[in-house]
Amino acid sequence: MVRAPKEPIEVDDEVRLILGPTVHGGHSIAHPLGHTAFVRHGLEGEDVTVRITEVRSKFVRADVIEVHEPSPFRVEAPCPWARSYGCGGCDFQHVDVAHQRTIKGAIARESLQRQAGIDVGDLIVEPLGDVDGLHWRTRMRWTIDGAGQAGMLGFRSHGVLPVDECLLASEGITAAQVTDTDWSGVESVHVTEDSRGEVSVWADRELVSGPRKAKQQVRDRTWEIESTGFWQVHPAAAASIVEHVLGLGDPQLGESWIDLYAGAGLISAFLAEAVGVTGNVTAVESYRSAVRDGKRALADLQQVRFVDADVERWQFPDHVDGIVLDPPRRGAGLDVMKSVAAAKPRTVVYVACDPVAFARDAAVLTEAGYALTSIAVLDAFPMTSHMECIAKFEPSA
């Protein structure tokens, strides 16, 4: 298709157009006046008017401000701040919850095709028990404005919006009434809810109320971690990830496994139970408080060894049967993925919260002789464009 030549375009210009598919980041693709545009609050096929919000040399950003012919999957956003020049936290409040999962599956598939040349076919994204996609966030951060009022940041903005209630927050966090408090002198407020329903409120680095340690339970095992430390945000995500990792990796008695970016040992614990006392699990994590918390939680599992080290600089052992990695959003990167492949495990299970970073890492594995043999996608972040991918790789020959 020959695209029209670019015409001049400026911030606040309004253009009527037909939206293309939704891509990574939750934006619809469009081409106003010959420019490539990333458009928020739209759906593929809609006839809309957009307002240009940012102009760059290679692309522009825009928001839908009027819908002339809506998609059949468009719904009324439950939050009034999910709009043009509104809160930046949600991408899909205007989309039917079931169709949100269809979009995420298409994004994950397209990412693997584009970045790694892998076609996995249609992906069915699994819900985690959500009916309406609301009230699932067990970890929240508010930014405080100059008047001491807690609010949310606008999309790609440092401006604080007076959002009085976030509809994604868990009921326990909402009950903490953060937005009804004067936070003068504070930059940000963090609130977490643990598996017991205990809520902790932190103003900057100071604990205001609730327990310092959060208790998080998965299956019959409990962790006590710093309430601001990393844990899955959706209350059902940790258990679901463990179930999928064990199902895909199928760890056996006596095997040796490595858990990279292990955190407090969520996955290591259940790998250890599977390999038994004749096997071993090495949990590699650079965040020291997580290592401390993990050692305490897994003290009864002598087959687990925690290593306080950066994965990028850690020396892999000579023999390993399986490797699990759950890297940060940026992915593991070229060097780590080369080391994973060079260790020649019988299986690699990759847990990813960013489909594009995951696909880049998958390309390294496939070039090194591994094949993606199974993948699951979890809707662990409803109303947003984020998802959790869990994939199995095995030697291709």
Image (cartoon, grey):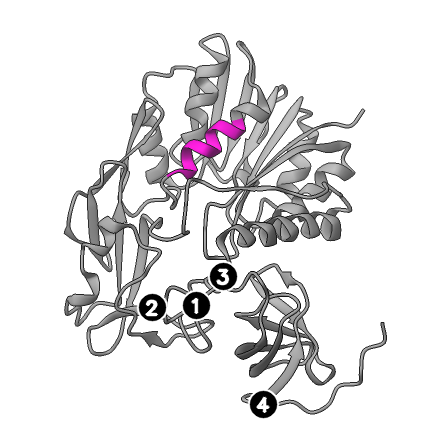
Kind of residue indicated by mark 1: Gly
The magenta stretch spans residue 77: no
Query: Which residue appears farthest toward the right when viewing the image?
Result: 2
Q: Is residue 263 left or right of residue 68?
A: left
Q: Nearer the viewer, mark 3 or mark 1?
A: 3
Residue receiving disc 3? 92
Kind of residue indicated by mark 3: Phe
Identify the residue at image location x=19%, y=73%. 148
**Local secondary structure at mark 2:** strand
Q: Are marks 3 and 1 in contact (CB under 8 Å)?
A: no
Does label 2 or label 1 sit earlier along the sequence?
A: 1
Q: Nearer the viewer, mark 3 or mark 4?
A: 3
Point out residue 265 in the picture as x, y percentages from the top left corner. Answer: 41, 30
Does label 3 or label 2 sit earlier along the sequence?
A: 3
Does label 3 or label 4 sit earlier along the sequence?
A: 4
Is residue 284 at least partly visible in the picture? Answer: no
